[in-house]
Amino acid sequence: MSLHQLFCTNEAIAREVDSPFLLGIDARDRNHVKALRLEVGEHIAVVDASSDYFEVEITALQGEELWVRIAKHLDAPNDTVPVMLVQGLAKGDKMDTVLRAATELGIAGFYPTEMSRSVVKLDAKKKDKRGSRFAQIARSAALQSGRPTIPEIGSIRTLAQVAEQFGPHDLVIVFWEEEDLESSVSAFFDSPATKSLLESLERIWIVIGPEGGMGADEVQCVEDSEATVVVLSLGPTILRTETAGVVACALVLNELRNCVAQVS
């Protein structure tokens, strides 16, 4: 049975080896803690401010205070190459939907990106506000899904600016509705060349266009980066941007985990 998980504000839990200690709970997480209805003697997983991961036993509950002792150190799962999602800026709550689901699936980073067909146009103040909202959604989704890390949230920038981060040891997968249907995720990952490439990768970036998709010039912008770039299809139907982002992450992460399982 998986353990309930919390992110705590304690700097280094590893120092607290001799006796029970007060678990620092961020104000943003107090409602989540109340909803768990934790009890004395129950074990939970906690991640401290230094990203160390522990199983702890609850020794006392005093109002909103949670006292615990270390049961054991846990190894955080790190079974795949980090996957980053570059999501074309979309209107309404579509970005929230994509971020929440992609966090649950296991992405390492989320980069909301202005593209030529993005309907949404944000000034600096609105970008900051949206960025704060994205950070809270990622934190909440990480808590809910029991993952020990929170995805990095990139600031809202243009595709050309984001592409500057693509390095020579990165793989960028552009999902484009105009690509040949035979260029599928499974066919790409089944290739011996891809399996060899995975051994030296630092990151995998998934690029998804906004409503209306990506222009050919934007695909070319990505292809001109330092990374290894492939353009793939998500199938014969045109998906909504919020559907495409989630489906792409699920497919890529599943293929990556299958590759890891085959090696081990």
Image: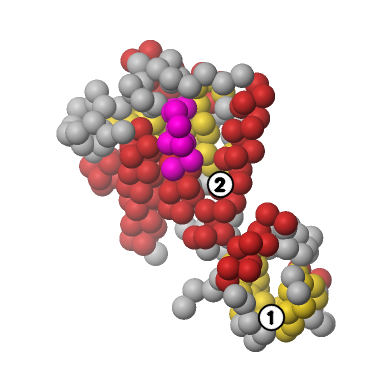
Residue 206 falls inside the magenta stretch: no
For image coordinates 30% across by 27% down, the residue present is 176
For image coordinates 23% across by 31% down, the residue present is 238
Q: Nearer the viewer, residue 75 or 264?
A: 75
Local secondary structure at mark 2:
helix
Which residue in the structure is indicated by mark 2?
Answer: 137
Q: Is the residue marked by circle 1 packed among few (<14), some (14-19), or many (20+) residues within 10 Å?
A: many
What's the amino acid at mark 1?
Ile
- Residue 36 higher or lower than 155, as above or below: below
- Residue 123 higher or lower than 95, as above or below: above
Q: Quick check: 5 left or right of 221?
A: right
Q: Nearer the viewer, residue 172 or 243?
A: 243
Q: Which residues are magenta?
A: 87-97
Residue 233, percent across and down?
Answer: 25, 33
Residue farthest bottom in this picture: 41
Q: Quick check: 183 left or right of 151?
A: left
Which residue in the structure is indicated by mark 1?
Answer: 58
- Residue 70 higher or lower than 151, as above or below: below
Residue farthest top in this picture: 217
Q: Quick check: 130 left or right of 242?
A: right
Question: Earlier along the polypeptide chain: callout 2 or callout 1?
Answer: 1
Q: Quick check: 41 left or right of 177?
A: right
Residue 259, percent across and down?
Answer: 35, 54
Residue 129, percent across and down?
Answer: 64, 32
What's the amino acid at mark 2?
Ile
Q: Quadrant of residue 5?
A: bottom right
Q: Is the residue marked by circle 2 packed among few (<14), some (14-19), or many (20+) residues within 10 Å?
A: some
